[in-house]
Amino acid sequence: MELARLLVFLWIATTLVYLKLSSTEGRAHRHHHKRARSRHSNMGSPVYQSPAHPPPSTREPNDPDECENVFDVMTFGAIGDGSTDDTEAFRTAWKAACEVESGVLLAPADYTFTITSTIFSGPCKPGLVFQVDGVLMAPNGPDCWPENDSPRQWLIFYLLDNITLTGNGIIEGNGEEWWELPCKPHRGPNGTTLPGPCDSPALIRFFMSSNLVVISLRIQNSPQFHLKFEGCSGVLVDELSISSPALSPNTDGIHIANTKGVGIYNSMIANGDDCVSIGPGCAFVDIENITCEHSHGISIGSLGGHSSQACVSNITVRNAFIKNSDNGVRIKTWQGGTGSVAGITFEEIQMENVRNCIIIDQYYCFSKGCRNQTSAVYVSDVSYKNIKGTYDVRSPPMHFACSDAVPCTNITLSDVELLPSAGEMVDDPFCWNVYGSLQTFTIPPIKIAVYISTIRLALFGVLPLRVAIGKNGALCKRWNGNFFGFSQECSAHEWLVDFILGMIACRLDRIDKCGMKLSRILSRNQLINIGFDLCVSCSRLNRWMQLKKLKHPVLRDFYLSVPQEALLDVTSSLADYAQTSKGWNRIIIEKPFGFDAISSNQLTQSLLSKFEEKQIYRIDHLLGKNIIENITVLRFSNLVFEPLWCRAYIRSVQVILSEDWGMETRGRYFDQYGIIRDIVQSHILQTIALFAMEPPVSLEDEDIRNEKVKVLRSIRKLELGDVVLGQYKDSSMKKGEIYLNTLTPTFFAAALYIDNARWDGVPFMIKAGMGLIKHRVEIRIQFHNVPGNLYRECIGSSIDLATNELILRDVPDEAILVKVNNKIPGLGLQLDASELNLLYKEKYNEEIPDSYEHLLLDVLDGDNHLFMRSDEVAAAWDILTPVLNEVDKSNVAPEIYEFGGRGPTGAYYLGAKHGVRWADE
């Protein structure tokens, strides 16, 4: 969202500089006029105090006495008496102004100009200004509208670039007689509803144009929309006054559709429909410091009508005042549409006597007869922050009506305080099929559902573990328990069992009496469908678990596969309502463990307020791979390696995790966190800590963790110069990249240094990426070259190719490889670099358990050495947070690389900078 605001402000600054220059550098074509009179004082409605810290005002309209290339419509034959048709004079003046740089078409003060429907088309020379200092007036009603003119639009600006519409005057729509026509179902006298449709003109329409400025005008009484932008880019609207009566139907103040890069600032709008309406195809819209009165508020939509597709993203509304309106901030979609609304922020908004202050309506319809459908525009990632004021009790202050088929997700509320305007009792909000989180307590209280999907865990994690337990008699004797699925998904237990049977049958084909064992296993699993109240649900879960009476002390392990925004609510409810007092309780949480150092510390402190450190298991499935355990086994159990494990012998260490697939269904999650937070903070840094730690006192959990955290605290903080970011480009559009914005990295390479006696000066090179040429997970240790190597001349031109290496590989084909130099058989002395290999699939004819199985069995055994402790999490974030802050603050763009390639070329320059040759070179 900050990126969107930055882009808008950059465009505004560039435009204003250009306009300033263009006003003084035009060719001589000067007309002299008396100075324009002062701006009109108000819009006929009360002036409200602006919200704090508005954007600075940009510029005043041009002074004709100080501008060159001014084309006064009076010199082109305009009369300006309010009754004579001055259309031809404006068209001729436009044509002349259009042909010169920095031309100004002037409608001077003290005159009233009536013109009919007109298209002001381009292309024109840059810097064109249309300045209205007098009154510009539309024909008075449909009876006065010329028969051959389009009844749908009045002033059309078409195919233009770098144009400004400004002035101290008024643009008058004369819409009163149009409002009596039935344009669509709308409010009538005494609460009645009037039908539609009809044709009424929009007052001002910009179409297929770019780099537009509309500033310092008074626009009023439009027959329909006052100001429209369609198919445009780069729009600045500033210091506008728009007004029409409250019962003037369809008179949206500002409407945008299929338009990107919009800034709307410092304006007052009082009208009979949406104050600002944002239609399909809009992105990167910034609205700040505006006042809306007796309108329908600020709306995104309507979207998806007539089963159409609509996408809206990156919209920010900030510092707004909404008064006496039917709606506050609204998202409205039709049933049956497709597309998405995402990345929406409403913050710092003051409400006064507003109905439906906050509303998402996915059942938008002109009548009560619209049928429910199976598709809808997907609404997600909507944030409401610091929204306060009073509401009209005729409607609930918050109304979330989300589609049955497509729920609203990741809806967050913070500091929302809405009270009845006349001191009535506080109304309950309306919530239907909406999921998200509350950052703070709201007034009135609201309970947004937390979407808990542990069915996926049961299918792909717990059940294979349960089968592994069933295959091992020793484990069965040590552990005897039940599995409870805890979900808000409405799935029958019988369906779940059938699905599991189909999924894991192939894993049981070599087990004696597998059907009997599988039935016994499945009979001890229970899927519990819960409601939206976490406290009640956790109490219900507790009662189910108490029904299973066991002879031994009870161990309750809670695996939480929940969104990060819901984690604290769920852990708090489990701690208060579902723990056992007759044994042990543990929680297992998935990465990411926070967003940065500050948020991670807040998360840690909240968890520790409910659970002890030893009860918290932070799981990263990549740490359950055999390669991780082999790091310490290979080093500490083999004398041939331990003495070499230091800077005297090791030249560099590469930790490589490359994937040949894209984001697929993880795109929305990955877009928020990126590869650094998702993979590097946990898996990569934990791998380095295990590799580089000093020998622990024992193999006990805490002894190993103590040594790991020492390494993490010794790692030098990353700088941007030692980092390469990349993002893959995939023309097939099948890898989930449609969810990624242009700044989300899918590739990360970096050089880390550990400032201690053992590793001083040794670069630890990291490479992690998606959409690369092959799937590979390995640790590659490169040793120094032999000093004074006697066989240098026999090795060949590249000494790097003959460097000894130790390779711990997980994918492809789990193996331990040692690269050594040997003599090529035959006459003469020629050396070759060969790999001595231990391939696991050839040496060990056993099925290798999944990493989740490994880690979950560790949980059952109480072994947490592969799970991050709180101080390890904090130390890891301390390494990465400085560079993350710099990347986010500076909007560092990742280097683009082709999907299926080797990644950004910058990674190879990074390797060369630190004297390291990547393994794939």
Image (cartoon, rainbow, N blue to C red):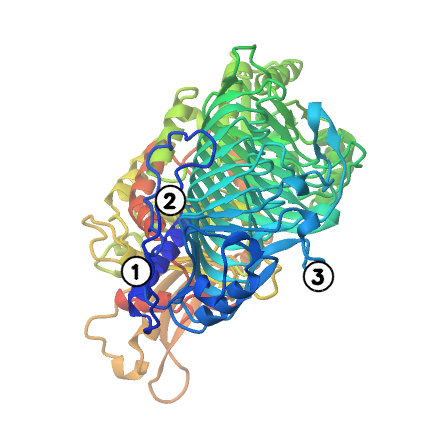
- In primary-sequence order, the first of circles 2 and 1 is 2
* Foreground pick, 55 / 462: 55
- What residue is shown at x 29% (from left), y 52% (from top)? 642
Q: Is residue 424 above or below residue 187?
A: above
In the picture of the structure, the residue carrying the numbered disc 2 is 39
Q: CA distance from mark 2 to mark 1?
A: 17 Å
State the image quarter where residue 792 is shown: bottom left
Q: Quadrant of residue 820?
A: bottom left
Identify which amino acid the numbered label 1 is placed on: Asp
Which residue is located at x 56 percent, y 17 percent?
A: 578
When the figure is inspected, residue 484 is found, relative to residue 306, above or below; the finding is above
Q: Amino acid at mark 3?
A: Asn
- Quadrant in the picture for the C terminus: bottom left
Picture coordinates of residue 319, whole percent (x, y): 41, 35
Residue 299 in which image quadrant: top right
Q: Which mark is residue 65?
A: 1
Q: Is residue 337 visible?
A: no
Mark sitting earlier along the chain (3/2): 2
Count of labels shown? 3
Q: In whole angstroms, how far apart are the C-alphas of marks 3 and 2?
A: 35 Å
Name the spot of residue 180 as percent of width and height, x first. Answer: 70, 38
> Residue at label 3?
148
Which one is in front, 770 or 122?
122
Mark 3 and mark 2 residues within 8 Å of each other at the beta carbon: no
Residue 726 can be seen in this image: yes
**Neighbour tally class for label 2: few under 14, some 14-19, many 20 plus, Cα within 10 Å:** some
Query: Does residue 839 appear to the left or right of 752 in the view shown?
Result: right
